[in-house]
Image (spheres, rainbow, N blue to C red):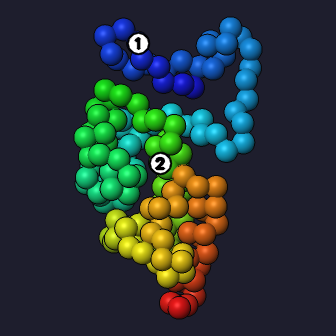
Amino acid sequence: MTTVRASRGRLRTISRESRHQGQIHRSLPGVVDEAWSGAALRNLRKQLMATQGELAQILGVAASSVHRWEAERVAPDRRSCEKLSSLKEVSRLLDKHFKAEGRVRFFTMPQSRLDGDRPMDLLGLPSAMKRIGELIRAILAGDFS
């Protein structure tokens, strides 16, 4: 499914099959094929217990961009979709082990186990899940070095 701009600036979703006249096209490895609706963005933001401004900070975009995405005035660009998908995966991992409070702080604080990077700086990178997963396992093991 792909979101495209329809008449009068509204967004609509069409399937890849209809775009390519019945031909089935597969996504390339590493290419995000997840469409982000306003409701999905809002649910992720609420799951993180974050404001639009805090989510914007985590994604490295303006707060007004998050507002426009949630209102479905525009769709997130490819890079932001990659970051949102990584954020969703990391959030699922955090849900298994930690309370929801402090999620924004987790993403925005530099971590020594990530060589001083913040988890939000890794979102969208191919190694994000591996490195953040290792950080979470170290925290669970009590290794704070």
In the picture of the structure, the residue carrying the numbered disc 2 is 84
Q: Quadrant of residue 1?
A: top right
- Is residue 111 in sight in this rendering? yes
Q: Quadrant of residue 66?
A: top left
Q: Report x, y in % for residue 99.
A: 39, 72
* Position of 8 relative to 37 (above/below): above
Q: Are marks 1 and 2 in contact (CB under 8 Å)?
A: no
* Position of 111 relative to 44 (above/below): below
In the picture of the structure, the residue carrying the numbered disc 1 is 6
- Judge left or right: residue 134 versus residue 53: right
- Judge left or right: residue 97 versus residue 106: right
Residue at image coords 61%, 13%: 19
Element class at badge 2: helix
- Sooner in the amino-acid sequence: mark 1 or mark 2: 1
Residue most toward the front? 116
Residue at image coords 38%, 43%: 41
* Position of 82 relative to 125 (above/below): above
Element class at badge 1: loop
Residue at image coords 51%, 37%: 78
- Judge left or right: residue 81 versus residue 47: right
Q: Report x, y in % for residue 120.
A: 44, 62
